[in-house]
């Protein structure tokens, strides 16, 4: 077994000489061949998981020839566990907890003789694994060790990784679990078991929506994989060292995929989350992992050649999923061609076709359609999602007659609805929802609205998924007020049920009230001009809905604050002046609103800085403002940030707290917490907003707010924070930042420090060229925000405007970022003047 100590800052095991972030591609992993450690595969729901990582709930990838096939009369052959999985206690325990007949009793006795625990403890492990939640499982483990905390160091790591999949009910349990996992990750010497622990930490943190910890695990996995690759390179270059580290009788060749296992395990953990969650931060993390994995191997073909079939599917599905990111993606056309050459399952091909439709590449979607039709089996033919997507793409790919053909197909489906309405209630609602979603994916919102109206006219009570899709359709059709009415009509009666439920929010679309519906509701309020109601929703979110707000709701709150601030500073429109023929529906001037006793813009600015400094307190002292030397930001980092927090947030120091307290007063707990914080730094700080990762739309609104409040001197610092947490800019955001820096401040010449910072930032992002960014480059450009017309103003600049939204389906542009020029800044200024005149002379909507 190849053993490499887990890398973390407190333990520098490798030589301390300076190395590059990634070793040279020509030297890294220079040999190919099948891995001897390939041992894990997918659960039925996930289809694939990280290679050789027997994560919770997953079966081995391929078994020995003597492994059994269960016969029709339910007779079992014993499972030989003393070979490939002999050292994996978690795998053996999971088999005993789910189907103990697979392991022969004599085989189990021989296996126990080689372990450090006896049969009583093994039975306790099995009983703990059979518990429904984390607290119950730990209660069983405490009983085995007489209530002492010694189990933290004595329980096998692979078994602890299995326990990480248990239900976690609150933040306290999550902190306790992550502290234990972080400590064991730092102390574990086996790469495979460490990868399993990383997968468990990702799934545990995502179970409560803690995106901050997920980002830290992603960063650690990338660093850990780089260290493993460097060790493997040193073994190849130093035969004597390699012979000393490997057993004398070992004839096993080096594993060329060992460095990839931590990355694959974290990718598998991120891909295991349901689609109803807020996926934009997960898209960003997937992109980082994919880039790190390809860089380690040198190229995508090299990576695919090293992976087993399940892991190839895992990587391909992750790359296809990242294309749906509202912030753009980094997948190149050549890489997509290489992915499609593989024999992918129909579900992955359907996702690829939807992704191509999402970015407007109908030709590539047609090629995938042909592959999907050839690969369909009898079972796949009756898959409603695949059938609907294939049917509507077939009639939409003809540009001249696309809409007329779609109407004919739509009428044909409507003629079959009487048969659907005769089905059981749950099945009919799912069919309606699937049909509405398919129409919306293919840019046919009006037809989707007809299905919703037909559904309501038949007296069918929609579920949460149908309500969310219907609200999104109304928003896309510039009817946000009707989306608000839908929410009030169908969710008010279920509000008390959400209080009565004792189960934690799972993020599933089947829940009557969930974050996805509430975020859509907040966006509808914002587009309807009901900005104060957005704040009231935010203020009472935990009390009313027993949920934590996420990035989407936070982004909508910033949008509302920006609109209130900007419209309150604008001149009054002629259309708003009183007249004899005044329209009762005419818009009234927007007055400055007070949130929490202060102006809305001030409240939003303070909240934004607070979230940044609480979620990433460990990074605060590394963030420097990219401006000229000798400015106010050239002082010591700590002094600079404390001054900012004192002024804007009322905090006298960085929001740090002692290490997370554990369940006992053991003197070693403080040390374990300190070690765990080296893997997940946020465990050492108080974090109240772990679900919120500011996206590009949030930073764009923040730039506007700082400019409007004459705080443009903080914009360079904001850009530095944006780079630190990995949010990719687009050209419009950079132009806005430069516009407000030069408009509201004193400099009469170019800030060379800011130009150099942006130049280096763009250079780092060259591998992340933003593709298919039509939604932001068109719908979010100055025309919408500056109120081009009453219809376009309803489509506000939100990154999360709906996964399938694309008003320009035939466009697929690649935008290369550049440092904003004087001409760009001047054009932005002209557009701002046009907005002011248009707002004054027209009957514009807000």
Image: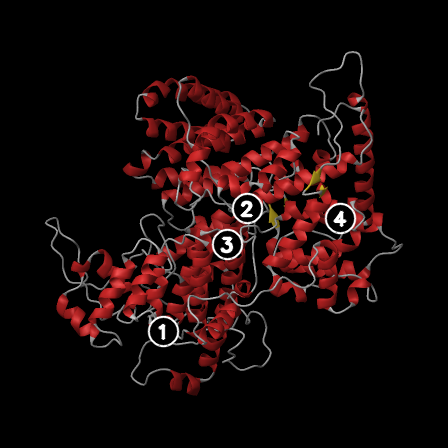
> Which residue occupies 38% across, 43% down?
347
Nearest to N terminus: mark 2 or mark 4: 2
Structural crowding at the residue carrying mark 4, measured as other residues with C-alpha within 10 Å and reported as few (<14), some (14–19) or many (≥20): many
Which residue is denoted by mark 3 in the rendering? Answer: 210
Which residue is denoted by mark 1 in the rendering? Answer: 150
The residues bearing labels 3 and 1 have C-alpha atoms spaced at a distance of 28 Å
Mark nearer the viewer, 3 or 1: 1
> Which residue occupies 44% across, 42% down?
351
Which disc, if any, is residue 706? 4
Mark 3 in CB contact with mark 1 (< 8 angstroms): no
* Residue 807 can be seen in this image: no
Nearest to N terminus: mark 2 or mark 1: 1
Mark 2 in CB contact with mark 4 (< 8 angstroms): no
Residue 486 or residue 310, whichever sits in front? 486
The image quarter containing residue 612 is bottom right
- Estimate the x, y position of residue 323 in percent, counting from the top left: 52, 46
The image quarter containing residue 181 is bottom left
The residues bearing labels 2 and 1 have C-alpha atoms spaced at a distance of 37 Å
Label 1 secondary element: loop
The residues bearing labels 2 and 4 have C-alpha atoms spaced at a distance of 23 Å
Structural crowding at the residue carrying mark 3, measured as other residues with C-alpha within 10 Å and reported as few (<14), some (14–19) or many (≥20): many
Residue 152 or residue 665, whichever sits in front? 665
Mark nearer the viewer, 1 or 4: 1
* Residue 122 can be seen in this image: yes
Which residue is denoted by mark 2 in the rendering? Answer: 550
Asked if residue 268 is positioned above or below residue 506 in the image, the reply reads: below
The image quarter containing residue 597 is top right
The residues bearing labels 1 and 4 have C-alpha atoms spaced at a distance of 52 Å
């Amino acid at each position: 077994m190849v053993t490499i100590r887990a890398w973390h800052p407190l333990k520098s095991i490798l030589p301390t000489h300076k190395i590059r972030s990634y070793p040279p591609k020509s030297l890294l992993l220079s040999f190919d061949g099948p891995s001897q450690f390939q041992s894990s595969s997918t659960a039925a729901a996930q289809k694939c998981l990280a290679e050789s990582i027997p994560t919770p709930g997953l079966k081995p990838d391929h078994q020995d020839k003597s492994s059994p096939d269960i016969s029709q009369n339910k007779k079992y052959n014993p499972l030989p566990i003393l070979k490939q999985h002999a050292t994996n206690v978690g795998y053996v325990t999971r088999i005993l907890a789910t189907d103990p007949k697979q392991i022969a009793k004599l085989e189990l006795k021989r296996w126990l003789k080689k372990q450090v625990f006896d049969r009583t403890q093994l039975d306790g492990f099995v009983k703990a694994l059979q518990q429904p939640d984390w607290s119950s499982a730990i209660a069983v483990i405490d009983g085995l060790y007489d209530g002492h905390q010694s189990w933290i160091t004595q329980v096998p790591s692979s078994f602890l990784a299995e326990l990480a999949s248990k239900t976690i009910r609150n933040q306290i349990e999550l902190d306790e679990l992550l502290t234990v996992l972080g400590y064991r990750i730092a102390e574990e010497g086996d790469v495979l078991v460490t990868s399993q622990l990383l997968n468990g930490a990702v799934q545990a943190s995502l179970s409560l929506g803690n995106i901050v910890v997920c980002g830290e695990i992603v960063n650690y996995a990338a660093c850990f994989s780089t260290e493993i690759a460097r060790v493997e390179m040193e073994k190849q270059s130093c035969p004597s060292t390699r012979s000393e580290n490997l057993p004398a009788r070992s004839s096993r060749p080096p594993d060329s995929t060992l460095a990839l296992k931590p990355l694959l395990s974290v990718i598998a953990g991120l891909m295991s989350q349901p689609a109803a969650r807020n996926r934009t931060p997960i898209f960003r993390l997937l992109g980082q992992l994919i880039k790190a994995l390809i860089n380690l191997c040198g190229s995508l073909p090299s990576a695919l050649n090293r992976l087993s079939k399940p892991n190839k599917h895992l990587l391909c599905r992750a790359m296809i999923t990242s294309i749906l990111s509202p912030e753009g993606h980094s997948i190149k056309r050549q890489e997509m061609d290489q992915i499609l050459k593989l024999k992918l399952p129909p579900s992955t091909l359907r996702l690829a076709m939807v992704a191509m439709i999402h970015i407007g590449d109908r030709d590539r979607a047609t090629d995938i359609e042909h592959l999907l039709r050839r690969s369909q089996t009898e079972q796949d033919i009756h898959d409603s999602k695949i059938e609907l997507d294939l049917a509507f793409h077939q009639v939409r790919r003809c540009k001249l007659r696309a809409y007329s053909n779609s109407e004919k197909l739509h009428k044909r489906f409507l003629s079959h609805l009487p048969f659907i309405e005769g089905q059981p209630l749950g099945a009919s609602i799912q069919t309606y929802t699937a049909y509405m979603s398919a129409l919306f994916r293919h840019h046919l919102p009006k037809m989707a609205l007809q299905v919703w109206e037909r559904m309501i006219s038949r007296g069918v009570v929609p579920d949460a998924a149908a309500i969310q899709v219907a609200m999104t359709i109304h928003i896309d059709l510039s009817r946000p007020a009707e989306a608000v009415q839908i929410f009030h009509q169908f969710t008010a009666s279920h509000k008390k049920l959400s209080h009565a439920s004792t189960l934690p929010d799972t993020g599933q679309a089947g829940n009557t009230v969930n974050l996805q519906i509430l975020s859509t509701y907040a966006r509808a309020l914002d587009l309807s001009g009901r900005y104060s109601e957005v704040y009231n929703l935010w203020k009472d979110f935990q009390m009313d809905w027993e949920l934590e707000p996420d990035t989407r709701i936070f982004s909508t709150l910033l949008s509302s604050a920006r609109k209130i601030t900007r419209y309150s500073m604008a001149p009054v429109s002629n259309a708003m002046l009183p007249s004899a023929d005044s329209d009762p529906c005419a818009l009234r001037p927007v007055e400055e609103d007070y949130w929490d006793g202060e102006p809305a813009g001030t409240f939003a600015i303070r909240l934004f800085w607070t979230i940044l400094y609480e979620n990433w307190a460990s990074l605060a002292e590394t963030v420097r403002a990219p401006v000229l030397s000798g400015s106010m930001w050239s002082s010591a980092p700590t002094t600079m940030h404390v001054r900012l927090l004192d002024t804007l947030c009322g905090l006298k120091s960085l929001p740090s707290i002692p290490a997370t307290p554990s369940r006992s007063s053991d003197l070693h707990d403080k040390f374990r917490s300190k070690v765990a914080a080296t893997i997940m730094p946020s465990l050492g700080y108080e974090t109240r907003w772990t679900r919120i990762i500011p996206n590009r739309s949030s930073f764009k609104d923040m730039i506007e707010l700082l400019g409007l409040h004459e705080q443009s001197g903080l914009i360079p610092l904001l850009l530095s924070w944006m780079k630190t947490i990995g949010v990719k800019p687009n050209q419009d955001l950079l132009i806005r930042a430069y516009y407000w820096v030069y408009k509201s401040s004193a400099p009469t010449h170019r800030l060379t420090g800011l130009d150099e910072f942006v130049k280096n930032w763009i250079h780092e992002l060259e591998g992340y060229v933003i593709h298919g960014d039509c939604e932001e480059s068109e719908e979010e450009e100055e025309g919408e925000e500056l109120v081009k017309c009453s219809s376009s103003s309803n489509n506000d600049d939100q990154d999360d405007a709906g996964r399938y939204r694309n008003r320009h389906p035939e466009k697929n542009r690649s935008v290369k970022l550049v440092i904003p020029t004087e001409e760009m800044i001047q054009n932005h200024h002209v557009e701002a003047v046009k907005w002011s005149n248009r707002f004054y002379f027209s009957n514009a909507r807000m």
